[in-house]
Amino acid sequence: MSRTKLLENIKAKKSFLCVGLDTDRSRIPQHFRNEPDAIFAFNKAIIDATAPYAIAFKPNTAFYEAEGIEGWASLQKTIHYIKQQYPDILVIADAKRGDIGNTSASYARAFFDLLGADAITVAPYMGFDSVSPFLAHNDKWTILLAATSNAGSADFQQRADATGHKFYELVVRKACDWAGPDQLMFVVGATKPAELAALRKLAPDYFFLVPGVGAQGGSLAEVADNAMNKSCGVLVNASRSIIYASDGDDFALAAAAEALKLQQEMAVLLNKYGII
Amino acid sequence: MSRTKLLENIKAKKSFLCVGLDTDRSRIPQHFRNEPDAIFAFNKAIIDATAPYAIAFKPNTAFYEAEGIEGWASLQKTIHYIKQQYPDILVIADAKRGDIGNTSASYARAFFDLLGADAITVAPYMGFDSVSPFLAHNDKWTILLAATSNAGSADFQQRADATGHKFYELVVRKACDWAGPDQLMFVVGATKPAELAALRKLAPDYFFLVPGVGAQGGSLAEVADNAMNKSCGVLVNASRSIIYASDGDDFALAAAAEALKLQQEMAVLLNKYGII
């Protein structure tokens, strides 16, 4: 999906919401557990309920791999379902892959060609030749980890180099030379407003995928104030706060209500920053 | 598998060889391609041919994911086959995973509990809480990327921080506080002897998983000279140079011959350093 199309969708839905499909068998409502593919059945209900408010869905591969072969099948069915029913919604495989060149090329084939995802998250540690095989699919999005939302981001990402630049800044500086904002995005956590602002200066035109709103405590308004640009420039992800909004029979309604609440806040911010 | 048992195996086989199962459908001999599970059939032949010389097998998950659901099944069958037939051989899932805590916990379940691997490779970029869920399985091995063998390792890993320490040194320094040498190893490429020596000083007792010998050009003698310790301390991986030693009907014999050649060089080095 092109950047132009992505912005059109954001304007049409007045939303920059990404719904994270971190589907954990132990947390889905009881009545799904007798279904032949409980994970997919749950996802389908969540997707249908939240699609009006979402411009992206982001299944995290860990939760599917934890179910083995059946989980991989659920992931495939989930992605195909989204692409068939909601072709305008971006599908991000949150896989955090990255390996030497020929190996990353295999991962790119797996996620882009086979599963049909529009985007994949990639870990930067191994450098250019581990990222370039994803970028070679120039009709797809590569979303590079920069400043993540977890406590452990302090261990390495926030260390400064000899010139005073933090490692997450080095990652963004270098990667901006590797690809333009039409095929590369960065992951920047909502829990660190200062990092959002610093990285927006370094990469003014790139989209940021922003986790950490919701269960992790980041604020939507702070994300917009620090990182929104004239093309919106942020996709804000919420996972658990939406998909587990209720564990009763009303889970889909509750998920829709949570997504709607975020979308309404997003509409206000898109308006405030002159995007709609 | 305990560190004591691993060292026993090294002494018994006079080998510290890890055979990388980077099985690519397009490179396996023609006659396998009509088999119902060509990838597993090829792996089984390679495993049986090289097991006498190997103390570890390392399937790289990218090559299996590129085959979709069938690939995940091939990976599972491959790991189960090794554990059934050769219970003394370490199985390393080369997955380079790493995510926030609850997500890494799912990956750990996927690879340790479900697939039955003894070890997994993990990317350090997201810090302690992304690694600790793997370490929580304290009867398994976590193998953290430190200094990789590819050209891109120069982009971030080899940058120095404000105190003059390279990023890969920071990773090893910090991680040595997270876990001891009975459950943590590091990936250090064979192509950088100076890095091997520097990291051996920082982490004298830890095993290093060393890729880069063979197709990537690293030297076995240099690895031993720079990184061997009194408990061996190195597992040297070769993938393509063994499993694709021949693309004819003699592929298994050729793989065995390559593995034997490396094992014989390893026996000399183990003897030179007083381990056997």
Image (cartoon, coloured by chain):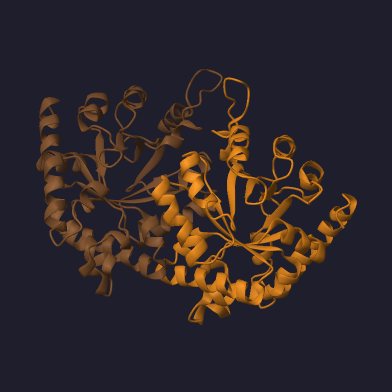
Chain colours: A orange, B brown
- Vertical relation: A114 (above or below) B209: below
Q: Quadrant of residue A225?
A: top right
In the rendered image, is residue A126 in sight?
Answer: yes
Q: Report the residue at 22% width, 53% height from top.
A: B243
Q: Is residue B163 left or right of A273 when viewed as pictured?
A: left
Please state which of residues A169 and A138 is positioned toward the viewer in this rendering: A138
Count of numbered circles on the image: 0
Residue A16: percent from left, percent from top: 75, 58
Q: Quadrant of residue B69?
A: bottom left
- Vertical relation: B170 (above or below) B20: above
Residue A139: percent from left, percent from top: 59, 58
Q: Is residue B159 left or right of A43 when viewed as pictured?
A: left
Please state which of residues B111 and A120 is positioned toward the viewer in this rendering: A120
Q: Is residue B145 left or right of A81 when viewed as pictured?
A: left
Residue B199: percent from left, percent from top: 36, 26
- Vertical relation: A66 (above or below) A227: below
Q: Report the residue at 22% width, 59% height from top.
A: B82
Q: Quadrant of residue B85?
A: bottom left
Residue A134: percent from left, percent from top: 51, 52
Outermost residue, top side: B163
Quadrant showing the C terminus of chain A: bottom right
